[in-house]
Amino acid sequence: MNVSVIELDLRGCEPPQPLMKTLEAIATLPEGATLQIHTRWRPALLYAELEKRGFSGESQEQPDGSCITQIRRA
């Protein structure tokens, strides 16, 4: 099984760009792939948007206060 991870570093983006760029990326996410986003903080507004589109997200806060979120089809 070849599972790909697509990484998107959004730490330099101002809101709402991280949310918009993430939603654009999942629209073309290949079947079975995972999108990993790195944001400056926990993407609280993202979870409901993912659920509406049939995705799930799991976030882990990093020591520097940033957050890495793994997004997959639900």
Image: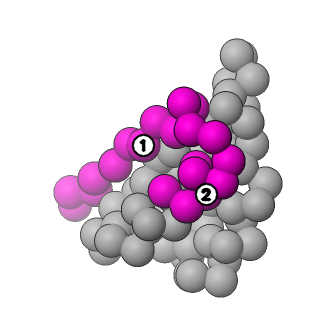
Residue that sits furthest to the left in the current view: 2
Binning the other alpha carbons within 10 Å of mark 2 as few (below 14), some (14 to 19) or many (20 upward) gives: some
Q: Nearer the viewer, residue 44 or 33?
A: 44
Q: Amino acid at mark 1?
A: Leu
Q: Is residue 8 shown above or below 65? A: below
Q: Is residue 22 magenta?
A: no
Residue beneath disc 2: 19
Q: Position of residue 55 (x, y in %)?
A: 56, 73
Q: Which is more foreground, mark 1 or mark 2?
A: 2
Q: How many marks?
A: 2
Q: Amino acid at mark 2?
A: Leu
Q: Position of residue 9 (x, y in %)?
A: 46, 36
Q: Is residue 11 magenta?
A: yes
The reply, left or right, for residue 28 in relation to residue 54 is left
Q: Nearer the viewer, residue 56 or 18?
A: 18
- Figure quadrant of the C terminus: bottom right
Q: Which mark is residue 18?
A: none
Instruction: State whether residue 48 appears in this view.
Output: yes
Q: What residue is drawn where x is 41% and y is 62%?
A: 25
Tell me where the magenta segment starts and ends, as one range: 1-21
Q: Position of residue 10 (x, y in %)?
A: 52, 39
Residue beneath disc 1: 8
Secondary structure of the residue carrying numbered label 2: helix
Q: What residue is drawn where x is 49% and y is 56%?
A: 21
